[in-house]
Image (cartoon, grey):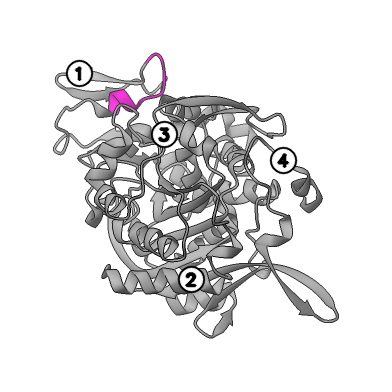
Amino acid sequence: MGKRRVQFCICRFPVLKWTENFARQERGGGILLKSKVAVVECREYRQELVDEAVRKVVGLLGGWERFVGKEERILLKPNLLAKCPPEKACTTHPQVFAAAGRALRKEGYPHLFFGDSPGNHLIGVEQTAQGCGILPEARSLEIPTADFSEGEKVDFPEGHAADHFILCKGAREADAIINLCKMKTHQLERITGAMKNTFGCVYGFNKGASYARFPNADLFGQMIGDLNLLVKPRLHIMDGIVAMEGNGPQSGEPVKMGLILASADPVALDSVFCALVSLDPKLVPTNVYGQEYGVGTCEAAQIEVVTDGETLTVEEAAVRWGNPDFKVERSADFKGRINMLRFFQPLLDRKPYIKKDRCVGCGICIQACPLEEKAIFFRGGKPAYHYRKCIKCYCCQEMCPKQAIDVKQTRLAKLADRNWRL
């Protein structure tokens, strides 16, 4: 895996040598390569505390200069899923964004930009960033918006699942990307963190179309693995001060975790997140394919956690900072495990459904459906589903502003998961 990754050189994105994501450690006369994940406690969104936490996690990894050059065009890429206030824990908190931007300005980095492709392609980056509280911070730091209003096809013949992507112009023009992700759950991939946050480099409507091209968790995870090989963010900083549990990535509940995390290895970072919430990282497709494709590692033995003055194992980090009651899907995924039951697959799928007492009939869920022949439609002033058309991408649930869509598992699926987990 390592050799193949060194050979990649795609478009204008710079190539990091495989070993740059890892810390060298002597073990029994040999050299063992380990991914380094920095973790620093930060209990609340007070700007001086967040500034210090971000300074520490980057310092533990070697400082900004290890990842970006002074003359490079640097894209700060937060999670801007939707126009949600910061207290909803749906998007990267503006103070985490500000801490990264302020630190880079202080270190003398002049060419900073920010951007993301929002979940609703009909709403612009600045309008979404204003609703999330990030735009005022960007303006105060004189960080302009990158061009996410245009897309460009980028061929990727080296891809395992995707042979091309439609990337936003602002992501294509960047020399380096710093990924400012959010610690959240996700109905399709279980969690969304560093790996999946790169999906915001995909342009506009093509994000929804990607769910149609890659209509299940495995295929979608493969695509995300390819995307990370292509865009190669230099550094990933995760906002885990207040995370989202439950019905993520937009309709879940905020939960305090009190942490800022960072790594050059997005798979290792997401795997530490998994450990903190008692989730097997190998149940997350973006981790599995990220490791298979050489993006990083999800093996606990190949990850070291660094914090103030000490180095921990992943297991020790989970004991110190973990939340075993964190609401996340931990059950093994039944799909593809028992061939003789494939006929019953429609009865095993997890389906989105409308909470009619919360639904206001805004129609955003219908707009979010990526299918040309929509799987969701109005009936009696409320949305309803054509389940035979539904590809279970959960874009409707992801974009609902009223938390009116949840996902349910059938009794047969619960029975199968409990009794036939192989």
Q: In what element is the residue under mark 4?
A: loop
Q: Residue furthest toward the bottom?
A: 309
> Which residue lies under the disc numbered 3?
147
Q: Residues under labels 2 and 3: Cα distance?
A: 29 Å
Expressed as whole percent of the image width and height from the top left, the position of residue 343 reads 56, 26
> Which residue lies under the disc numbered 1?
379
Task: Give whichever of 52, 409 is nearer the camera.
Answer: 52
> Which residue lies under the disc numbered 2?
57
State the count of labels: 4
Expressed as whole percent of the image width and height from the top left, the position of residue 221 reads 56, 41
> Which mark's residue is nearer the viewer, 2 or 1?
2
Q: Residue furthest toward the top?
A: 373
The residue that appears at 35% across and 41% down in the rendered structure is 408
Q: Does the magenta stretch include residue 307?
A: no
- Which label is found at residue 9? 4
Q: Residues under labels 1 and 4: Cα distance?
A: 50 Å
Amino acid under disc 2: Val
The residues colored magenta run 365-373
The residue that appears at 47% across and 55% down in the rendered structure is 330
| Lower sequence index among marks 2 and 3 | 2
Residue 323: tell me if it is visible.
no
Amino acid under disc 1: Arg
| Lower sequence index among marks 3 and 1 | 3
